[in-house]
Image (cartoon, rainbow, N blue to C red):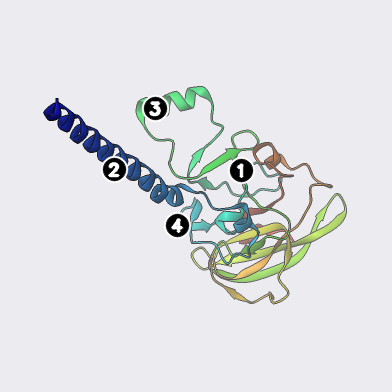
Amino acid sequence: MPHRARRLIVLTVVSGVLLGTLLITAFGQGATRQPSQALPGPASRLLPVGPPTPLTVALHGGLRIQLPVAQSRVTAIGYHSSGDGAIPLNPLGHQGNEGALSRLAHKIFGGGGAGFLYYQLSGGETAVLDVGAGPGTDVYAPVDGTIVGISDYILNGQTYGVRIDIQPSAAPSLVVSLTHLSADPALTVGSTIAASSTKVGRVLDLSGVERQALSGFTQDAGNHVAIELRAAATLLP
């Protein structure tokens, strides 16, 4: 009996040590994993942000259109038609609302793009690029080039901000136009600008005067900066 009692005591002690070790290890690992899995708090979205990290969102030949808004401020990206002869852009990324047949074809044959999402806002045209962001968001140059025009943007007979026309260094025969924004006070005609680093203005709130198609894919009113491409010879005054 004494021998059996000693064995029972030893087994009990060993089991207790093993159990304690397992518990300490489990809780210790949980404590070290938790910080790495935590998501940034919503307050970080309220902090000021600088220029966007360079990211090409659309192409036309050798011309690259860069994201004009800091990535953390973008609500959605969309394309739609234009009624005044804008040149279609070639979207990068992949379409988030493509049809079932297109999705099936991409699964079978590949393609369809990768990376960020964009949405087709009307028909199949890509003449106007809308980059969604809240009112007041800083807008930066989408291309390297020179400011060749700053004019009133007229909507339903009223002036709402400006249209900024840029002659891109990579394609001098073309003009990149930005609307739905107010101009930065430091911007003047003749200014040389750099993509993703020169601030050109701020997003305006036009949700009360214009139907914002982008709102169907965002959680806000769908405000945005609009980008179009035209031949310099046909630029409207």
Identify the residue position indicated by label 3 in the image.
107
Q: Answer with left or right where residue 218 lies relative to residue 56.
A: right
> What residue is at 66 percent from the left and 57 percent from the top?
234
Measured in 3D between alpha carbons, the distance from the residue under mark 3 to the one under mark 2, in whole angstroms, is 49 Å
Report the mark closest to the observer, 1 or 2.
Answer: 2
Q: Name the element at disc 3.
A: helix
Q: Name the element at disc 4.
A: loop
Q: Quadrant of residue 142?
A: bottom right
Point out the tag, 3 or 2, that comes first from the N-terminus: 2
Identify the residue position indicated by label 4 in the image.
62
Check the image and name the residue furthest to the right: 157
Measured in 3D between alpha carbons, the distance from the residue under mark 3 to the one under mark 1, in whole angstroms, is 23 Å
Identify the residue position indicated by label 2 in the image.
21
Measured in 3D between alpha carbons, the distance from the residue under mark 4 to the one under mark 1, in whole angstroms, is 20 Å
> What residue is at 18 percent from the left and 29 percent from the top?
5
In the rendered structure, are the residues bearing label 1 and label 2 in contact, judged by CB atoms less than 8 Å apart?
Answer: no
* Residue kind at label 2, given as amino acid type: Thr
